[in-house]
Image (spheres, coloured by chain):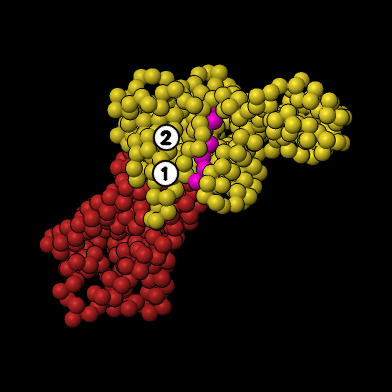
Chain colours: A yellow, B red
Amino acid sequence: MTTSTSAPVTAPSTTAVAARTRGLRKEYGSTVAVDRVDLELPQGAVLGMLGPNGSGKTTTIRMLLGLVRPTEGEIELLGRRLPDGAEQVLPHVGALVEGPGFHPFLSGRENLVRCAAFEPLLPRKQIKQAVEEALDRVGLAQAAHRRYRGYSLGMKQRLGLAGALLVPRKLVVLDEPTNGLDPAGTREIRKIIAELHAAGSTVLVSSHLLSEVEATCTHVAVLHRGTVVAQGELTELLQAGGSALQVITPDVEKALSALRQAKISARPLGDGLRVELAGTSAPQVIETLVQGGARVFEATRWKTGLEELFARLTEAEEAERGMSAVDTLDGGSR
Amino acid sequence: MITRQFGSEVRWMLRRPRTLIGLFGLVLVPIVISFGIWTAGEDEGGGPPGLGAILQGNGMVVPIFTLFLSLNLLLPLVASIWAADGLAGEAQHGTLRGLLVAPVSRVRLLFVKLFGLAAMSLFAVTLMAVVGIIAGTAFLGTDGMMTLSGTTLDTGEGLLRIALFVVLVTFQMVSIGAVALAVSAATEHPLVVQAATMTTIIVFQVLGQFSSLDWLHPFLITTGFPGLIDVMRDPVPLDQIWDSTLLAGCYLLIGTGLAAMRLITKDN
């Protein structure tokens, strides 16, 4: 689904890749958290990293940021190999990993000032301004003087985001950025991601909220049980998912037999049936149905949503392993 | 850049409520000691022999006596708290990740932490000494400083001895803190760091009591503590002071080395 996976990593590329991993593997004791992850983050893209809880999203992100050493595999970040190039490239990377981390006894503003003191790209004189701008951007200016201890979950999340945006970044990594945010906060995060995208930054968002990813991302990578099961442009992935027709009819039996005779695959669903459009078209299906004596009340083109795609990808994997997909799917789609 | 990080570190430590409470507690020690000896002197008209005899009318000894006492327990405790908050505490709050992604290289981060520890230790010990001088002079008066050798030093020389003692005690404190930092790098629980450090200090002092273990004594940092009182002799015999400081230096190097090794390979 991606075009350049075969490009040799040995020649650190100047091509449009913000981050790339090859054969990434991380073991914690006898548990394998991440295995064979070949991730590609095109420059300027907004990549949504999807996966159920425990699928290795955060571990992958931590390896990308040099926080965790991979057991095996290679990481290239903004054109440099990690961990050697970390000091050169990490100043250009803003990150919110595993929830916001701040000192409870300091105010939001003081916390940001402390973060800013360790930002190599921020001259001392600009710290104050950068902090105020970041606070403004995430809508925390009013609460900036209050102690972090008293912040709500959403405010903490916003402060974490402000920390990632202290300096103009080439790459912004956001791990579950909408955790604990109200709908308004979620919209703001979307807006900020869109702004970053428009400004040419690359964004990596991990989320288990599929609607979130569908709304904001240009690219998607789906992780499951520590491996990437699909990645590529969102639209491409969704198209590859095929399409179907949702037909509302009271005469399900008649409809099914008519379609079977016409060699069109379909199955009962809700108040009617779902017809696969592989090798046929919507008018043809409806014609078949009407000729077969089934009354059609409504026919809707079924566009594959991310949710469905995600379910299928993770389900397929589960089926291979002969396991129930129910748990992970529940965890993933909530 | 590094001065800015040092500054941020010290400001951060000073902003902690527990640091302020700790400093307040430390400052109380010389005041309580001065007051206690003053009242004892009033009641008995001479105080207990030895200690009281030296301290009566000799307020300049209070800071040295205070630091000497505190070095056994109080100052290691404070150092262990700072070391615990420095790495384990930051890991617990998730702020260590933020620093590492900023990025601060792990070795530099350790030096920032060590600097913070040293600066705050020097500050705390100096503060105790200054308050000791003031409280001692106020309660007990001063005619220069009477030494353990029986001679009397003038005020200037006395202050110099106090300054020397401050430096020596700070160094011991920082060395203990460095070992605590090594523990701190290996855990996410600040309490573990404090418990481990204090247990070690107490166990060392207990081991120091057994003469059957005297082969072990030269390796215990606590063995060096009593020798530091030699700054109160006239002239100052340097060999015990030198031995104590050298021993503490070894602890400092080993602690820093272990902390660096742990920090560099650590997953965050």
Mark 1 neighbour density, 10 Å: few (under 14) some (14–19) many (20 or more): many
Q: Please name the residue shown 60% across and 48% down the image.
A: A325
Q: Which residues are magenta?
A: A217-225
Q: Secondary structure at mark 2?
A: loop
Mark 1–mark 2 CB contact (< 8 Å)? no
Q: Quadrant of residue B217?
A: bottom left
Q: Please name the residue shown 20% across and 55% down the image.
A: B249
Q: Amino acid at mark 1?
A: Asp
Q: Amino acid at mark 2?
A: Asp
Q: Which mark is residue A140?
A: none
Label 1, label 2: how many angstroms apart (C-alpha)? 9 Å
Q: Mark 1 sits on what residue?
A: A35
Asked if the magenta segment contains residue A224, the reply would be yes
Quadrant occupied by the N terminus of chain B = top left
| Observer able to see residue B245 | no
Q: Please name the residue shown 48% across and 55% down the image.
A: B18
**In this view, A51 is above or below B32:** above
**In this view, A73 is above or below A201:** below
Q: Quadrant of residue A118?
A: top left
Q: Secondary structure at mark 1?
A: strand
Asked if the magenta segment contains residue A310, the reply would be no
Mark 2 neighbour density, 10 Å: few (under 14) some (14–19) many (20 or more): some
Q: Chain of mark 2?
A: A
Front residue of B76 and B49 = B76
Could you tell me residue A119's position as x and y percent?
Answer: 41, 31
Q: Mark 2 sits on what residue?
A: A38
